[in-house]
Image (cartoon, rainbow, N blue to C red):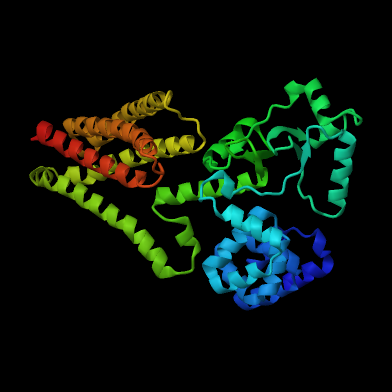
Amino acid sequence: MDDLATYLDKHKIKDLHPSEISKLLKDLDKTSFNAAIQMIPKGMIGEVALQLPNRYFSDIVDSFTAQELAIAVNELESDDQTDFMQDLEAVNDKVAQAVFSQLNENTQEDILYLKKYKAGKAGAYMQTEVYTADLDQSVHDVIRDFADLRQVNQLKNIRYLFVTDKDKKLHYGIGLEHLLVFDFQKTLRENIEAHAKEFRQITSYDNEKIENVVQKFREYDLDTMPIINENGILLGRITSDDIYDIMNVQATDQMYHLAGVDDDTEEAEDIIKSGISRAVWLSFNLLTAIAASLVIGLFEETLQSFVALAILMPIVASMGGNAGTQSLTVVVRQLTLGNITKSNALRTIKKEVSISVVNGILFAIIMGLIASVWFDKAMLGVVIALSMLINLLSAGFFGSVVPLMLKKLNLDPAIGSTVILTTVTDVVGFFSFLGLATIILL
């Protein structure tokens, strides 16, 4: 707490970014944390709370009255207001109702409107604050209105002017820098029509998947995107800072899913809940391990005859598992980035299989020679070489096909892919190695 107090004493609060404060707060114990957040202006609490991991949220709620939390919410933009209230409802619904009742009417309307969108839809991530002007307004009037709104702090983070008609249907999005070179005495319509090619508008629908919106931001290098309904009416906007947050969440989810854990569960302090979540996937892994062991059991006599097989067997499975994980990771990431489509999916499979074959031949030769010299048995080298080639080939194939199939079934490609792949590489590795040993060595 002393570090935070010193820092706040040396700087003006208005010059601090919420992320700077949140970093300091994360270094404090619970007692110091609760005392330190009381030093932060109430209007900044909402932004700081959203910067912190979810496990801190309940401590913040317990530290302030409903009236103080309402002040914090009113200072947020509409999308963040909605996020804050939804988090608050999850922690303490009674407090959430008390806070909501103290918000101004416009804020309440915005929150209720945005909450109607399902998670994963563009509308759930948009903010309703947009700077709009009518096609037939003069540029002079538009700039004057903008200045007036900015002076009373009703506009924040505005880089684009959205031009609509009298029915609020979106026609153009114009960077504010364009206004400075327009003819101030002419209308927006007249200025835009003179330079129509410069104002191509990229939009998304409110019920469109957020993944599609993220892809458009990447493709067109956007700062802001207007969100419209099916009739072309402007509803709000999504900004690049929101997209960065979404991309971070997606990347985190992807890593967790590949490891068989859940982001929300891992953020919680509940050890039992986290343990159960992990245990579910560990149960699947146990079943796959048993399946691999059953395959080994089929060749019990072969293993008893050649003890060297037991020594070399894990190498085949390990190499296959690692090769498959490489293919799996590449394909899952490329799917997330939108770089794999129906038309080039086969090319992706061919590429991964080709890489696996090349590596399979290379390491089959290396391991074949090592096994031959190690155990002074040339045919044992042939067995492990052929088995390694087979397993790496299957690893590359299934490592690319499994996530593609899950994607086709509208499932997250990361969820379950690792378990399926591990099963394949273990079973194929053990079966091919021990099966070839039975045929060639006995």
Q: Nearer the viewer, residue 405 or 66?
A: 66
Relative to 339, is 142 on the left or the right?
Answer: right
Q: Nearer the viewer, residue 208 or 335?
A: 208
Q: Is residue 93 above or below residue 215?
A: below
At 42% from the left edge and 27% from the top edge, which residue is drawn? 342
In the rendered image, the residue lying farthest to the front is 167
At 19% from the left edge and 30% from the top edge, which residue is drawn? 378
Confirm whether residue 51 shows in the render: no
Confirm whether residue 187 shows in the render: yes
Relative to 150, is 230 on the left or the right?
Answer: left
In the rendered image, the residue lying farthest to the right is 185
Q: Is residue 73 above or below residue 392?
A: below
Quadrant hosting residue 29: bottom right
**Residue 167: where, in percent of width, then height?**
70, 38
Relative to 442, is 272 on the left or the right?
Answer: right
Total residue callouts: 0
Relative to 300, is 222 on the left or the right?
Answer: right
- In which quadrant will I find the C terminus? top left
At 57% from the left edge and 49% from the top edge, which residue is drawn? 124
Quadrant hosting residue 239: top right
**Residue 253: where, in percent of width, then height?**
48, 50
Q: Is residue 197 above or below residue 84?
A: above
- In which quadrant will I find the N terminus? bottom right
Quadrant hosting residue 217: top right
**Residue 273: where, in percent of width, then height?**
40, 66
At 32% from the left edge and 47% from the top edge, which residue is drawn? 419
